[in-house]
Amino acid sequence: RPLPAALARALDAPALTRTGRALALAATAFVVAVAFAGPPEADANLAPWALFVTFWVGLVPASVLLGPVWRRVNPLRTLHAALCRLTRTSPAGRRALPGRLGYWPAAAWLTAFVWLELVAPGRSDPRAVGTLILAYAAANTALAWWFGRDWFTRGDGFEAYSSLLARLCPLGRRGDGTLVARTPLTGLMAGAPEPGLTAAACVLIGSTGFDGITRTTYWRDNVDPSSVPAGTLGLAAAIGAVAVLYVGALRLSARLTGQDPAALPGRFATTLLPIALGYTLAHYFSFFVLEGQTTFILASDPFGTGADLLGSTGNRIDYGLAGPTLTAQVQVNAIVLGHIAGTIAAHDLALRGPGGTLRGQLPVAAVMVALTCAGLFALLSG
């Protein structure tokens, strides 16, 4: 259903976009400045908390509730526009982005980021965080200067991540750009399959699953948490296991229904997004609610000068905001409901195409049940 005209105009106002991008650019510059000029200790510096908690985890609810927010405020788009003006280069770039790449660049960036978040030594060092932000910004701005602003849509890992999750948002757009209110799963059915989308979804599910595995008693008792090779192999194995299960199930389904085994995984890739959302909410809910308070506390004295800008200096985390009972309820419901939504979306998508028989849907349903059980096992073992 179309939104009221006044509300649609307000949401699409250019001034809102400019303000959002200016604030996002200023916030990014501020975090980088704090990373290099603030306290050297990770637990006293705002930058690691702002990146790994407030931004990375907070981007999920923001995108699901508000739509592709990072595309709207992406500071790299602002830097790219300024670079194009400075070099008198067209924003369309010097060379068209090859269509065969699809979401593969974003999947690669996301894989690199989750490795840095979960495995890399010294990942919380403020100076390393500042360097990471600058390197990522420089690389993607340069790639957008060469391939054009369309690079951000498929190549910027964070913008692609936000836009994919936004397919679950109750706000969307029709083909003509009209803002509409819709049922959350409607966005999963829109658009043609794109290369790399399956890989991006598997990275999101596998990395979150790996994070859960590292919290289990078995992992803590048998694996050195500081071992980079073990962590790297574990992360790769988790992502690979999700990919093998999913692609294998879709290829089996294709054979059972007489469809193209190579095409089916891409066609159903968006049905993994509710599962990815469920895994993310389950594993990061308490982390975001509790540790996210640290960002606000440290923001009051970002450079360690004794300031109290927000009146929160010296505050402690309020652990009552996400107690064990609430956390357990959110975790179980997020995983179960995410997989139910994914199953419904897969069933609906199957009925829209050829070979939409119950027999052909059984392998997909089996994989989704397996992922549900694996997610619950990781939570209960943590």
Image: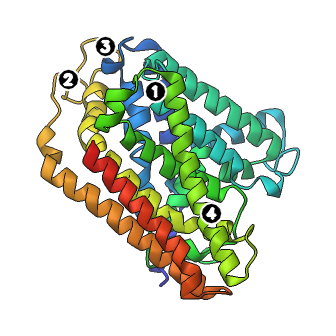
Report whether 260 appears left or right of 347. right
Q: Residue furthest left?
A: 320
Q: Which residue is mark 4?
A: 248
SS class, disc 1: helix
On the image, numbered disc 3 is attached to which residue? 304
Disc nearer the start of the sequence (1/2): 1
Q: Nearer the viewer, residue 65 or 218?
A: 218
Q: Which residue is mark 1?
A: 30
Please give the name of the residue rendered at 65% of the width and 47% of the height, measured from the top-left corner.
Answer: 106
Pointer 2: residues within 10 angstroms few (<14), some, or many (20+)? some
Q: Earlier in the sequence, mark 2 or mark 3?
A: 3
The Cα atoms of the two marked residues, 3 and 1, are separated by 14 Å
Residue 268 located left or right of residue 321: right
Closer to viewer: mark 4 or mark 1: 4
Of the image marks 2 and 4, the number of the one nearer the N terminus: 4
Q: Amino acid at mark 4?
A: Gly
Looking at the rendered image, the disc whose residue lies closer to the viewer, 2 or 4, is 4
Position of residue 307 relative to residue 87, above or below, is above
Inspect this view and state whether residue 121 appears: yes
Real-space CA distance between mark 2 and mark 4, rounded to the nearest whole angstrom: 52 Å
